[in-house]
Amino acid sequence: MKHLRYIIAIISPMLLLACGGANTGKVSLQLTDAPGDFKTAMVTISEIDLVGSGGTTVLTTTKTTTNLLTLANDTAKLVQDAVVPSGTYTQLRFVITGAYVEVEQSGGGTIIYASSPSYEGLPSGAVVGGTLRMPSYAESGLKVDLPGGLNVGTDSKVLLVDFDVAQSFGLDAGASGAWVMHPVMTATELVLSGTVNVTLKLAQGATLPGSATLGQFSAVLTNSGGSAKTLALSDAGNGTFSASFLYLIPGTYTLNLTASGLSSFTTTPAVPLSVTVASGQPTAESFLLTAAQ
């Protein structure tokens, strides 16, 4: 489920503890993505700051260029053990200096929309077909609130930032034919992210038609903003197929199942199913396939 849905980051299930100075702590930052219907969504982040009541602390000025679509069920490490003054911080600030999206066309082929025809993140020989507008993110930066604030003492904190691709890029409402980048990002401490573990097996007496297998099934998890991630179910042994959605921001999601090559199927419990992801906890959803054709 490539959800280029604007770009959202997620938090790991553990808090890394480390030693800092008497009045400093350490902060690490990881980026994840909620996918969308794009072939590529490349962004360049040139600076990341941590903003609090005591001022702004620069976490990194190391330039990072990444394809958000590769982070749908993974993370990219942006900052590692940056030393910051102890205190309470309320925002992250991202300086985004370039980006491009490659969008599939209804008549076939793709077209690239870039922040500049000379954007450094473009592949060699790329032909830019349109403009990707990025309102002032290279100057004022993109500000991402930290819900509840981040309290840094003498320990180490790990933050997960979710960049929702599907919601972050869209066609200009005007007639220019350009695309506009309005990033949708959320952040949380890594210990607060969640996981959804999905399993599927045949109910007693149920069968699949012909040569069909449970390996033709995929799980689809959709967030409240409509961005969906799809994972193929893999053989976990003993007749069970499974998939795990990692680095999820706590909240309510919709879980569904799809099957290639089958016209219809039924499960217990029925799908789609509403799923609540809790902070720092795994959620297990087990399905029995009762009929298929």
Image (tube, helix red, strand yellow):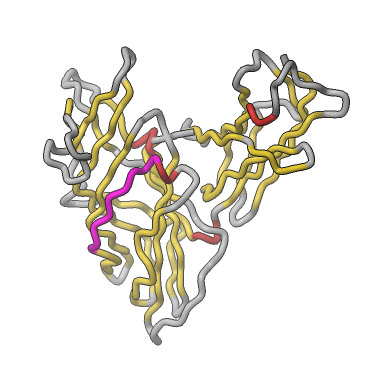
x%, y% of residue 288?
78, 31
User: Which quarter shows the C terminus?
Assistant: top right
Q: Position of residue 136 (x, y in %)?
A: 17, 45
What segment is highlighted magenta in the picture?
61-69
Q: Residue at x 13, y 38 (%)?
A: 116
User: Residue 109, percent across and down?
Assistant: 30, 20
- Please name the residue shown 61% across and 44% down the image: 244
Q: Say whether residue 62 is magenta.
A: yes
Please give left or right for residue 25 compared with residue 259 in the image.
left
Front residue of 190 and 286: 286
Above/below status of 176 relative to 57: above
Front position in the image: 37 or 158: 37
Residue 260, quarter of the rendered image: top right
Q: How many marks?
A: 0
Image point 47% across, 56% down: which residue? 188
Residue 8 in the image, given as x and y percentages of width and height: 42, 45
Residue extending farthest to the right is 205
